[in-house]
Image (spheres, grey):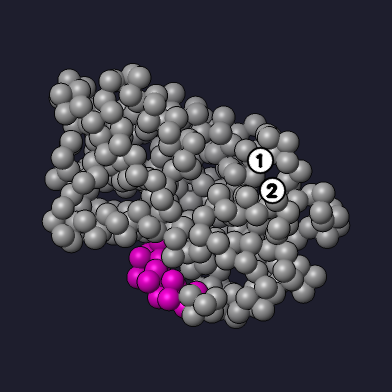
Amino acid sequence: MNTPMLMKVTLAAAMTVALSGYALAQDKADVEAAKKEGKVVWYTSTPVETGQKIAKMFEAKYGVKVEMFRSGGSAILRRFLQEHQAKRINADLLTTSDPAAAAELGDQGLFVPFKPVNFDKIPEGAKAADGTFIAQRLNIITIYVRSDKIAAADIPRTWDALLDPKYKGKQVMTDPSFTSLQLSVVGMNAKQKGWGYYEKLRANDIMVVQSNQQVSDMIKRGERVIAAGALDSYAAEDRKDGHPIETVYPSDGTYVIPSPTSVVKGSPNPNAGKLFAEFMISDEVQALFPQEGSYAARGDMAPPAGSPAVKDIKLISVDYDYLRKSGPGVKKKFNEIFQ
């Protein structure tokens, strides 16, 4: 099974493995063959601006055009699977934020095993041992708030604090049917706390939107003042732009979820797909993520400025075996509560 070891080992511990100094056998992309193919088709849930920067960097370096289709992680997976079932493979490379799905599809033989340069620098909890997926980045899911709208003493510091009636009508979150990061969060919160937790959030008039970008926009406009479990790179970017936003790493734990990248088996441009996968964990791309307020996948990269290292964050363990089996049921139950 290719299921990521994050089920058994925290990413903080896995970072130690990534930095331990041993080197694994590495596969090499064929640059000339990729240039002859001329393009790579990339299905991705990477934040739009970051994805566009990566695509332009790749085009400038290799002269290979990147056709990027960007949407939420769950939406990306739906499109990919629909095309696969219709025996119409369009994507060369797939980047989502759903390690459970990546492991499942890898086991089904939909991805090409590939261990490019720097594979050994990715923590064990963020890649498949055979290379059928490799994390592009790590996603930190936090609570963040408008610090000018909520007094410091009133900021929620735990997941359970979000249920307090004083936050009624003030919160916003993403939809796990659209955003695969939220599928991990909702699935694990429901498993640990029961579905009553989300029924109480519903009663507290939390707003559900599709994407993390929409959460960010709602917070910036002040329409809602608490992001209840959202991708923190947006908060980091918004702070950089001068918005009064504070990140809370909940005292009862924070979710750190890898974004897997996989080379698609039977794709139109297989060499360009491998070259782009190799580029994704290169020095220049991995260094880009901290600059954008995100965490690089590689263990040898610094965290974003002003943010703690992964090893210093109290993590919530994610059971990806459970999510592989229960993902559809989690989406269904969530929709029943919030419809």
Q: What is the count of numbered marks?
A: 2
Instruction: State the image quarter where residue 27 is shown.
Output: top left
Tell me where residue 252 appears, x and y as whole percent: 66, 61
User: Mark 1 is on which residue type?
Assistant: Asp
Front residue of 64/293: it is 64
Whether residue 16 sits left or right of residue 28 in the image: it is right
* Residue 118 within the magenta-colored segment of the rendering: no
Residue at mark 2: 220
User: Mark 2 is on which residue type?
Assistant: Lys
Q: Is residue 324 above or below residue 257?
A: below
Front residue of 285/218: it is 218
Q: Is residue 45 above or below residue 325?
A: above
Tell me where residue 220 appears, x and y as whole percent: 69, 48
Q: Which residues are magenta?
A: 318-334
Residue 234 seen in this snapshot: yes
Q: Residues within 10 Å of mark 1 (few under 14, many from 20)?
A: some
Mark 2 or mark 1, whichever is nearer to me: 2
Whether residue 244 sits left or right of residue 192 in the image: it is right
Instruction: State the image quarter where residue 107 is shown.
Output: bottom left
Could you tell me which residue is drawn at 15 percent across and 40 percent down?
268
Could you tell me which residue is drawn at 53 percent across and 73 percent down?
190
Tell me where residue 39 appears, x and y as whole percent: 23, 31
Q: For the residue labelled by badge 2, is the local secondary structure a helix, a strand or a loop?
A: helix
Could you tell me which residue is drawn at 21 percent across and 46 percent down?
90
Q: Which mark is residue 238?
A: 1
Structural distance between the alpha carbons of marks 2 and 1: 8 Å
Whether residue 85 sits left or right of residue 308 in the image: it is left
Q: Residues within 10 Å of mark 2 (few under 14, many from 20)?
A: some
Q: Is there a contact, CB below 8 Å, between mark 2 and mark 1?
A: yes
Front residue of 300/99: it is 99
